[in-house]
Image (cartoon, rainbow, N blue to C red):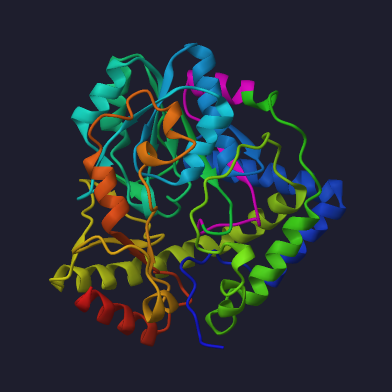
Amino acid sequence: MLRRQLPVYSPITLDAVLAGAASALSSGRARAAREALVAYLSRGFGASDVLLTDSGTSALRLAIAGAASLRPALATALPAYCCYDVATAADGADVPVALYDLDPRTLAPRPESLERALERGVSSVVVAHLYGQPVDVDAVARLAGAAGALVIEDAAQGIGATLRGVPLASFGSVSVLSLGRGKGWTGGSGGALLAHDERGAAIVARARHAMAPGSRGMADVARLGAQLLLGQPSLYGLPASLPFLHLGETIYRPASEPRAASRASVGAAWRTCELLERETELRKANGTRLLAAARASEKVRVVESVDGASPGYLRLPVLRGAARGAIGGRAARLGIAAGYPLALCDLAGFKERVKNRDEDFSGARELAARLATLPTHSRLSQGDIAALEGWLAVG
């Protein structure tokens, strides 16, 4: 079987898998891990309250629903280009949506588009840090505050990134983290909702009573074990070749009821905290090297960081010279992938929820047509990086 590089990697060890299993089997271990993880998140991201959920999507759904409860009958503002799980969260919260366009040069909101969305009346603005590329949340908050809306910071892809020296997931009224497989930090599943002000605290308190209890999480233990075994380039080709696993695919899923994080996911996530600093350092070093190659290329255009931003490089986003659709062959084996294939204004089954779907979202549509991402994680060899630099040269 041909060697195949992982598009993204979340560090996992046998010790973490065993910690997850121990938490699943022991309520005492699970309670201790939960308390330690909550304290870690509170301290690291300046949160006044922390709620651990079964996924980042559940955390975002609870945040959107909580904001809507503070200003009923209003929409939530979402980026027109983002992970489809953001759409799923809005579906679960059952709120109308106003989209705002993104600038393909930075993946940040286009201010005039965001202002038009705010004029429609929204209870919240969701800001997403795509691929670890920070958005200036404070600039968004100034516009949102003038319209009476609060900011929900979706930092699911933001682990290791900072804005003006402050870690992402420290901004907005509430922030969302994901502990899913592809977010750079994992417990097999899971997410977190973090409060940063009084309105955020009210949202987290409401969410705590709105979700079902979590499970022991033996399925998470199995997932973590499979990730430990197969999450290496020499073996990743096996699961990647199985179509029913849908690895690397962007799927618009129906909403499911939010639950508390499983005992296993909390135990494993707490044990993998110690791996994050080293993984982040390696991602940033690889991302910086690949960014230099992208700048030197005439075939791709780089995504520039906003002022004061230090990307986490979950993946390196670039814009190809022309709309070229799916990526296959040797490029796919290197872990290169196309971005989300549709803007949310064009997503069947969701666009009907969008109040302003007929507006101009040319930036989001350009991203859907041209964006590609490159892996940056610690499992890249020097040969992989050289091959990625070669791909950047030819686009």
Quarter of the figure that contains the N terminus: bottom right
Q: Give the residue drawn at x 56%, y 26%.
A: 93
Q: Quadrant of the C terminus?
A: bottom left
Q: Nearer the viewer, residue 330 or 115?
A: 330
| Residue 233 appears left or right of 163 | right
Whether residue 107 is visible? no
Residue at image position (49%, 72%) is 6
> Of 356 and 339, which appears nearest the observer?
356
x and y, in percent, of residue 180 in the image: 58, 53
Q: Nearer the viewer, residue 395 or 18?
A: 395
Q: Is residue 113 above or below residue 224?
A: above
Is residue 332 toward the left or the right of residue 143 in the image?
A: right
The answer to whether residue 250 of the structure is visible from this angle is yes
Which residue occupies the foreground of this view, 47 or 347?
347
Residue drawn 56% across and 66% down?
11
Give the residue at x 43% y 63%: 280
Up-down: is 313 above or below 69? below
x, y (%) of residue 251? 52, 51
Q: x, y (%) of residue 100?
A: 30, 32
Image position of 260 with respect to 274: above or below: above
Magenta residues, start to end: 183-206
> Does the magenta segment cover residue 203?
yes
303 to 60, vertically: above or below: below
